[in-house]
Image (cartoon, grey):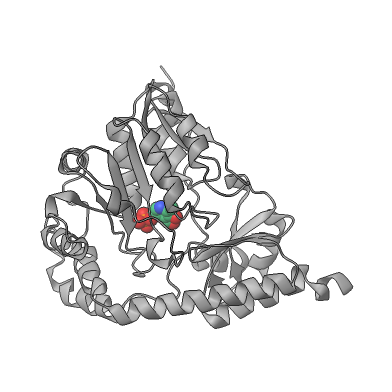
Amino acid sequence: MAKVEDLVLPSVAALKPYEPGKPPEELQRELGISESIKLASNENPLGPSPRAIAAIKAALPELNRYPDGANFELRRKIAEHHKLPVDHIFAASGSVEVLNLLAFLFLRPGLNAVFSDHSFAIYPLATAAAGGSAKVAPTSDGYSHDLEAIAAQIDENTRIVFLGNPNNPTGTIYRRAEWKRFLATVPEDVVIVADEAYFEFVRDSEYPDSLEDHDGRRLIVTLRTFSKIFGLAGVRAGYAVARPEIIRLLNNVRQPFNVTSLAQVAVIAAMDDKAHIAETLRVNAEGMDFLEREFRRLNIPFVPSHANFILADVGDGRTVYDQLLRKGVIVRPMGGYGYPRHVRISVGLPEENRKLVEALGQILGPDARSA
Ligand SMILES: Cc1ncc(COP(=O)(O)O)c(C=O)c1O
């Protein structure tokens, strides 16, 4: 009898599943360390909006019912927010769902997706899962998307370009002028995915909002998420904005109830909580300033970030990750992203940032060197 792996696409059989940040419960199970802090998945350290919690509680008695399969109120809310017709909005179980559906729709063996080296791990996974091949462009400086190099990879078999702006795991952005030049060169039958999961955190005046470039011609899909600034990673919710033909295709292949009822009510409530969003931005900006200052003091090189995480060169990322785990601090080693020297650290609450810096100081800083 044939091996089961031989019954699927070779690119699927060869895949290694996405490795998420380690949950604190796992650290407790593995090393018996309780009271750990997690700075590994770029989550909102403040927690969810209290309004979202209240909305979820109010929805609990209805859990015997299926969700609204059309995600109607949710899409209406998002459409209103962007002042767009509702048929431009696809609500999803996290933006990763859209990345997978786009690959499923537009790729197959013989076709390819183009993306940058050192970009979000789901791009190669989604591409391979659909049987497509990946064309990987070099970065400009080891960390940043080089849109010219990305455009140069596009050939007649390219169907998708995945762009993270800001990019995960580097926190770098491309700016408006480079983006406009890129748009002018990409063929009109290539789907340009502007993955803007960290959009709300960016303070750079030259940062382009891809929504402004949607027109009747180009195939731009803008992705946003409720997992980051909105603090709702656990309910899984995100969305795509695109022209209605693309939204219709996404609806053709999604599962019928892709956004849970709790996610729908939580997101609708969280979108109105301006105080929670403002407080998240404040905590992130102050935390980022603190981490940059402390990394300089400890002589730890880092990549200046526009998001809610920072890539730091700690010499040996895997070893420092393990040492931090033993001190109850969970970060993300970056070997899998091609950065064996680095860890990626999410900005936490002030006391969490202090605990991280103290632990890093003990491992790498002057204290460690003199010990
Ligand atoms: C660049 C990027 N895109 C998408 C996502 C996925 O977000 P979601 O939770 O909406 O699936 C992440 C999450 O870390 C991300 O970093």
Taking depth in this image into account, of 252 and 113 the one nearest to the observer is 113
Q: Quadrant of residue 6?
A: top left
Left or right of 186? Residue 307 is right
Q: Position of residue 332 (x, y in %)?
A: 58, 58
Counting the numbered discs, the total is: 0
Eyeballing the image, is 72 above or below 138? below
Q: Position of residue 365 (x, y in %)?
A: 78, 71
Q: Position of residue 358 (x, y in %)?
A: 69, 77
Left or right of 33? Residue 18 is left
Residue shown at 26% from the left, 73% from the top: 270
Taking depth in this image into account, of 312 and 220 the one nearest to the observer is 220
Left or right of 112? Residue 266 is left
Taking depth in this image into account, of 273 and 211 the one nearest to the observer is 211
Q: Quadrant of residue 277?
A: bottom left
Left or right of 337? Residue 18 is left
Q: Is residue 207 visible?
A: yes
Taking depth in this image into account, of 262 and 107 the one nearest to the observer is 107
Q: Is residue 69 visible?
A: no
Q: Residue furthest right?
A: 370
Eyeballing the image, is 40 above or below 69? below
Instruction: Name the quadrant of the N terminus.
Output: top left
Residue shown at 54% from the left, 76% from the top: 287
Instruction: Name the quadrant of the C terminus.
Output: bottom right
Q: Position of residue 319 (x, y in %)?
A: 72, 57
Q: Quadrant of ligand 1?
A: bottom left
Residue shown at 31% from the left, 59% from the top: 236
